[in-house]
Image (cartoon, rainbow, N blue to C red):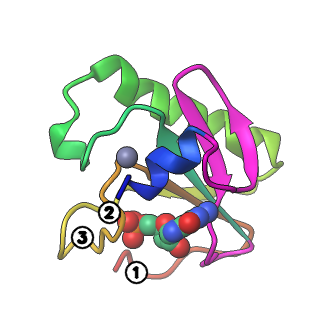
Amino acid sequence: MECIFCSIASKKMKSTVVHETERFIVISDISPQAPNHLLVLPKEHFETVLECKDRDLLGEMLEVAAAAAKKIGVAERGFRIIINTNDEGGQTVFHLHLHLLAGRPLHGKMG
Ligand code: 5GP
Ligand code: ZN
């Protein structure tokens, strides 16, 4: 079975697309943990951040997240970016992605 985020990136599977660039798609998380919860997915498949050696892509992933934060109007108020990695990092979908959380105070502990 194909990776779910590859299916979402290729639009074989439905999602709410908030922003898109040549190499990335930004979607709403299906189970939001904050009023705004976006996922920034590279269209290319990498299992985790450990497999990705493409510095341009990693840098662009942060730029795309910042652009998405501006687009949804949370940039000034603030937001949090998270990349869960492997088991103890809480990763459940093994296709590299960044979480952008916003819309409420995120002053709690990291974990
Ligand atoms: P992880 O736990 O791997 O860091 O994050 C995976 C995220 O993907 C979770 O927050 C989960 O809610 C979200 N997710 C899982 N399946 C789907 C899906 O089919 N569509 C969308 N939009 N999000 C999903
Ligand atoms: Zn994938």
Residue 40: % across, % down = 54, 45
Q: Quadrant of residue 49?
A: top left
Residue placed at 33% from the left, 71% from the top? 92
Asked if ligand 1 lies within 8 A of label 2, the reply is yes
Instruction: Tell me the kind of residue under disc 1.
Output: Lys
Image quarter where the C terminus lies is bottom left
Q: Residues within 10 Å of mark 2 (few under 14, many from 20)?
A: some
Comes first in the chain, label 3 or label 1: 3
Magenta span contains residue 16: yes
Contact check, label 2 and label 1, Cβ < 8 Å:
no
Q: Residue 89 has which mark?
A: 3
Image quarter where the N terminus lies is bottom left
Q: Quadrant of residue 50?
A: top left
The magenta stretch spans which residues? 11-35
Determine the residue located farthest toward the front in the rendered image: 1
Asked if ligand 1 lies within 8 A of label 3, the reply is yes
Q: Which residue is mark 1?
A: 109
Q: Nearer the viewer, mark 2 or mark 1?
A: 2
Magenta span contains residue 57: no
Dominant secondary structure of the magenta stretch?
A: loop
Contact check, label 3 and label 1, Cβ < 8 Å:
no
Comes first in the chain, label 2 or label 1: 2
Residue 85: % across, % down = 24, 60
Q: Which residue is mark 2?
A: 84
Using residue 95 as the reference point, say whether residue 18 is left or right of it: right
Q: Nearer the viewer, mark 3 or mark 1?
A: 3
Along the line of sight, the residue nearer the viewer: 2 or 17: 2
Along the line of sight, the residue nearer the viewer: 1 or 106: 1
